[in-house]
Image (cartoon, grey):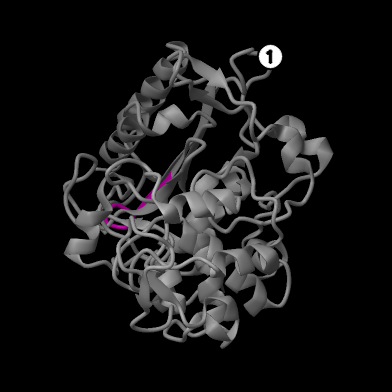
Amino acid sequence: MTGAGPLDPDGLRRVREAMASRVAAGRLPGLVTVLARDDDLHVEAIGSDSFDGAEPIRRDALFRIGSLTKPLVAAATLRLVEDGLLDLAEPVDRLLPELADRRVLRRIDGPLDDTVPAHRPVTVADLLTSRLGLGILTEPSFNPPYPIVTAADDLRLVLAQPDPRTPHPPDEWMKLFGGLPLMSQPGERWHYNAAALVLGVLVARAGGGPLGEVLTSRLFEPLGMADTGFWTAPANAGRIPTYYQTDLDTGELTRQPLSAPSEWTNPPVFPSGAGGLLSTADDLLAFARMMINKGDHGGRRVLSAESVTLMTSNHLTAEQIDSAGMLLDPKGWGYGLAVATRPDEVSAVPGRYGWDGGYGTVWYNDPHRGLIAMALTQTTDFLFDGGRTEFLTLAVRAAD
C-alpha cells in the first residue's frame, strides 16, 4: 500500500464540490459520500432526500443498495465455507437438488428443448463467480427475446431488474428456475445476476434459516450492521430516499413508482441475494473496513485473510472478461464483486475492488492506496451520466 496518513484536504474539497455541483444542477436530489483511509474518515450528506426538497438527506438514510447486496452475500458464503457447511468446489446439488442433471441449450437463441447434457455439475464457486451458465444477456441487445429469456419472464422469476419483485417464495422460485435449461456450460461464461439469486437460496439452506437471518448471524451482527436487512420497521420508512431514473420516453428524471418506501416495511416473499438489501453509509463502511483489513473488525476476525483474498482476486479468464462487455466495469470478477485487472480511467494501478447498485449506489476499496470510497444515491443515472466515474476518479486523486 502506497497511501498512508490523512487524505489530501484539497482533494476532499474537490470531491465535495463536484458532487454538490451535480446536486445543484438537478442531476440528483442528494447523496451521501464516504471517503476513508485508516482513521481518517470523511462523510458528507449533500442535498435532499427528494427533489421536493422537504428534508435534507441524512447520514443514516436507508438506501436500496441493489447489487451491493452481492458482495455481502458472498462474504456470508465464505463464512459458511470456513464453518464447514459449504465447500467451494462441491456441486450445489446437495442443497439445491433442483439444479441436478443440468441441460444446456445447444444454441442460446434456440428452443428450450434443444439441449445437451451439462459437462459437469454447477459448483458453489460457479455461483460466486457468476459462471452458473444463466443470466443477463447484452448481445445483440439487453435480454433479447430469445425463448430462454421470455420463458424466465413468463415465470416471473425476475432474473434481471429487481422490480417488480418476484411473487414466488424461495422453494417455489427454485423449482421453477430448475425447470429452465442453462444458456452455457457451467464455468464457461460470465452471466450476470441470476447466479446471485440462486446463491441466496443456497446460503439460506446451508445456514439453516431464512436468508436475512443467516446474513444477520454470520455477518451483520459481527460487524454491527444494525440497519442492514431485507426490510425495515414502518417507523423507518421516512429514512428511505425517493428513487429516481430518467424516463426513456420523455428524457426527464422521474420519480419511480416501483420500490416505494412502503414496499420495504414488510419481509419480502423472496429475499434477493442479487439486489434486495437496505443499508446505510455507516453499515457499509463497517463492511468495507473489514474487507480492507483482510477480515479483521476491531480485533475480531469476521473472515479469514484467505477468504478475503479469494473474494477480491479475479477468477475470470481474459476471454470471459472481454465477453462480459459493458456490464463488467472494472474488468474482472472475484466472488460477488468486480476487481480491476488492468489500468482504467479511474486508476492507473489495478487492484480496486467493489461494485455498484442499480438504484445508484457505488462502493470500492483501493488496497493499493488504503482507500475506501462510497457514493450512495437513489438515482440510477448517477451510474451512467459520469457521476460514478467522476466521484471515483476524484477520490483516488485525494488519496495520491
Task: Name the residue rendered at 42%, 82% in the picture.
Answer: 121
Task: Name the residue rendered at 66%, 56% in the picture.
Answer: 271
Q: Position of residue 203 (x, y in %)?
A: 60, 72
Q: Between 28 and 183, which is closer to the camera in this rendering? A: 183
Q: Between 373 and 84, which is closer to the camera in this rendering? A: 84
What type is the residue that disc 1 sits on? Ala
Task: Name the residue rendered at 58%, 81% in the picture.
Answer: 97
- For label 1, the residue is 54
Up the image or down, 62 lies above or below 184; here it is: above
Q: Between 14 and 169, which is closer to the camera in this rendering? A: 169
Few, some or many residues within 10 Å of mark 1 (<14, 14–19, 20+): few
Q: Which residues are magenta?
A: 363-372
Locate residue 248 relative to residue 395 in the image: left or right: right
Q: Is residue 295 visible?
A: yes
Q: Position of residue 390 (x, y in %)?
A: 31, 30
Locate residue 396 relative to residue 42 in the image: left or right: left
In the rendered image, the quadrant that contains the C terminus is: top left
Q: Is residue 366 magenta?
A: yes
